[in-house]
Image (tube, helix red, strand yellow):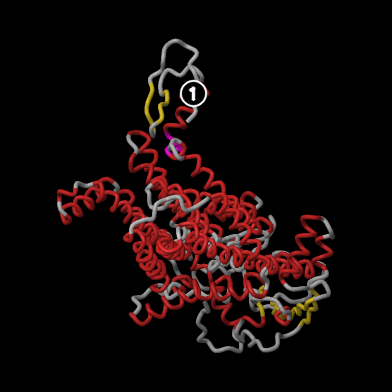
Amino acid sequence: MFIAEIPDASQAQPERKSIGGRIFPVKGARHPALAVVTWACEFLPAMPFLSRPNSSPLLRAIVVLLLVLLAAHALMLLNDGLFMDDWLVLKPRPDYFIDIGFLLNGAGHPIFYSYDTLANWTGAPVAVMVSLAFAGIVFGATCLVLTATRLGLLDRAEAVGFALIVWTYPGYQLWAGKANAVYVFSFGLLFVGAWLLTLAFSARGRRRVLLRVACAFVFLLSFALNSTVMLYAFVMLGLFVAKWRSEAAAHGFVRRTWLAAWRCALGYPDLIVLPLVYAAALSIWFKRIGLYAQHYDAHFPTLSEMANGWGAFFDAGYRDVLSHAIRAAIQVPAPFILAAVLVGVVLLLLRPGREPTPPRRATALPLVLAVVLFLALSSPYLIAGLRPSSTHFYESRHLLLFGVPAALALLAFKRQAERWIGPSAAFAMLFGLGTILWIGMLWNDYVFMQARTLKQEALTRGLADRVQPAATVYALDDHFFDYPSRDVPFGLAEVTGMLRLAWGNQPFFGFALRAERPDILQEMEWKRVAPGTAFRHFDPSGPQATISLQASSGAASDRALVRRYYACRLLARCDVAEFLAQLAQITIKVGPIAGILPLNGASEDVSPSR
């Protein structure tokens, strides 16, 4: 955007080209750097945004948005722990053994496999995955704002508020999960693809080709999170609407609709067949087999099942989130007060309310779209027989996309409220209050995940300081449940992973006593030999022992514990190793595990758990 202001040293004037209302030289530039900048101006997707007359206010709004998102997700940068299935696909240490072949030959996740392989190859998989999550948040939120404002769907303040609701949604509690960072990155790529498609729609020539190729590639990578295909369908619907609106009204509704559909199919065949090609590739070369074929129990649900499933998604995705946020705000108001201060700064910087009130049709449409999108996003999970849960953070992994319907509903309510109380008050009441609840609850979840990481590190360090007893099968009796803090039992992969991290790559099998059934050994033996299994290196047949994990003198509530840890780590007020050593007391008793059926004493009919 600055090229037109640079004088040419020669007398001959280069040929110029108009891009987005600005004049840029495209031929005859003498300086190589000027030629490079000229090429970037012509082909980089961001240039149409930068060349807009009102780019400065929009750029300021995006900067404000990114700063708020950085503050909201800053605790992700400090959490270097692994959770649940992270232990199966990422290497916390270079000599830690994993076998991620099941992602290709069992689970049918080739894109996940590529990300995990690359992350492990770098030797710093946690840093890579955190970077992926942040990239998804930053680029996804930015492209959402750019797309919505360029198409005239939202004004500047609405776009920022909408993006904040989507990218701080606390119903998805796995923001700090490492393997699931691919989910966040894929979600962000969907909005990047939508932005590229928006630019390609009005582009011409070589730039259009490059944008279309980049668009298809980005959308393909976004399918790593399979449920983004439903959002992709709505992006394609938006493309159809754009084509429909570009047709002459004189054609009549039916002919106009047919022409729009035909020109979409003729002009964008690559994007229309893209999800079909992806699904075909998975079904041919990366079929789900064994445990994973049974886990995704695809079937045609009855209307009753669909209604119950939608109720479960609504409860876990919205009702429980709001009730938990209100309860947390009453019990521990500090995070919500800080969030309110942050949102207040945003309102001062954005100065919302200068745009005209939209028509009533633009008020009702977001609410209708929110309902339709909610039903659509939950349908693939219901067809697969899956349900979310707000009580176990890992079972919230199905809810990542559900910040979008929430943002649409708030948008509809905001536009209706501004007819009564004005745009500024309506924005502050709906998007402001919603963002405060979202960020406050998001920080609470980050604190819980950090406290969980600290407990894992304390257990791992405590085990590593001991000589390994004569056992390979361990039950963890976790007495932190008796401590007044939120706690979720460790999973099989977590306990087994901590054993391997402490004592080396041996055929360990570990589980939490309170989380598993008495026939857990038989169940794991069945899973260990199943086709496409992720548990081939788990051996439940060895000598047994029980690990007792007790809270020690350094234990405290989650918030107090995390505050002290940050003081140690960031302010060097204590030694982190000593801090972790004071968290827990560990005792190990070798012998048969009480309450667990021996491996040769169970019935033969054992079905896999979920």
Can residue 117 be spotted in the picture? no
Across and down, in percent, residue 75 comes to: 66, 59
The residue closer to the viewer here, 408 or 544, is 408
Q: Element type at marker 1?
A: helix
Counting other residues with Cα less than 10 Å from the Cα at mark 1, is it few (<14), some (14-19), or many (20 or more)? few
The residue closer to the viewer here, 64 or 147, is 64
Residue 560 part of the magenta segment:
no
The residue closer to the viewer here, 608 or 561, is 561
- What residue is rendered at 79% in x and 66% in y? 580
Residue 44 part of the magenta segment:
yes
Instruction: Tell me where the magenta segment starts and ends, as one range.
Output: 43-48
- What residue is rendered at 55% in x and 54% in y? 347
Instruction: Name the residue tied to disc 1.
Output: 5
Reply above or below: 578 against 527: above
Q: Amino acid at mark 1?
A: Glu
Reply above or below: 432 against 49: below
Across and down, in percent, residue 7 comes to: 49, 18
- What residue is rendered at 66% in x and 52% in y? 124
